Amino acid sequence: MDLETIESVETLRQTISCKRSEGLRVSFVPTMGFLHEGHAALIRKAAEMAPVVVVSVFVNPLQFGPSEDFDRYPRDIEHDKKVILAAGGNVLFAPSADVLTPINLEVMVDPGSLASVLCGRSRPGHFRGVCTIVAKLFNIVQPDYAVFGWKDAQQLIIIKKMVSDLNFPIEIVGVETVREADGLAMSSRNVYLSAEERRRAPVLYQALEQARHRAIIGDCTDAHLLRKSIISRIVNEMGGRVDYVEVVRISDLVPLNDVEIGNTMIAAAVFLGQTRLIDNVRF
Ligand code: PAF
């Protein structure tokens, strides 16, 4: 099948309604483009869920802070088209900024308390921007399924809550983080890393994974001690600047004193040079 590329809301709606009238179900993968193997895994999952697979590519200005990387966020739509097609996507929705974020846009989605911790604490307004754009995309695409990566665990958890609280008739599907051979979580922002930073970057996952292992074998279950050991490796081995390292309950992102096997996430955000890396382990 060819990849149909659509820029307008009206054309997308017509295309989807035509497919639906043939009895076809629709799955959706929202992205900001510069697609990599992690996105390909989301698209492959979406293709398993339904025959119509819509992928959006939109660098959402609402989710970037004033001093963040919106202007230099990497973009390569021709490469994205190849990744989408190879992974089983068949509709690309690539609207321009004035279509999704016109200057008179005022109504925003408030993500509530789940957005006040972890990345939400260091990126005020970020999840409000994410929820607003994802809600708009959900209303435009009206998919049966929407697929998100566990790499952005807080985003996935907030989107699930939004869908439940606002009664979107959409099933949210999470896909495990895809990693480079050395463990670094794939991210469009990895392209910012210098060769030297890229060499040190895998320490983040190694430190998280070591803490997860210690917790599950019962060697250390104290959240404070686990955080301390992760932070020490990030600072000393990786040369990173810690934004946060938190041990939280997955269901509500509340900080834990002691791990709860089956409902714990250790999440971290680290600056390596100018690049902010995030990752997490769950157990
Ligand atoms: O995860 C992302 O790429 C973005 O936050 C999303 C979900 C596409 C919303 O802009």
Image: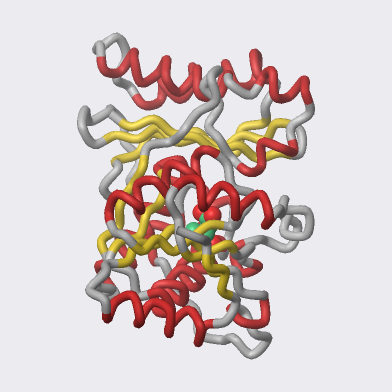
The answer to whether residue 97 is above or below residue 211 is below
Q: Nearer the viewer, residue 281 or 177?
A: 177
- Residue with the most extreme bottom position: 104
Q: Nearer the viewer, residue 224 or 131?
A: 131
Spot occupied by residue 229 in the image (x, y as percentages of width and height): 49, 17
Spot occupied by residue 53 in the image (x, y as percentages of width and height): 40, 60
The answer to whether residue 118 is above or below residue 247 is below
Q: Is residue 148 left or right of residue 233?
A: left
Q: Is residue 211 left or right of residue 3?
A: left
Identify the residue shown where x is 58% and y is 62%. 57
Q: Kindly tell me whether residue 18 is visible in this rendering.
A: yes
Identify the residue shown where x is 36% and y is 64%. 52
Identify the residue shown where x is 67% and y is 82%. 98
The answer to whether residue 267 is above or below residue 6 is above
Q: Nearer the viewer, residue 43 or 19?
A: 19
Residue 75: name its quadrant. bottom right
Residue 270: name its quadrant. top right
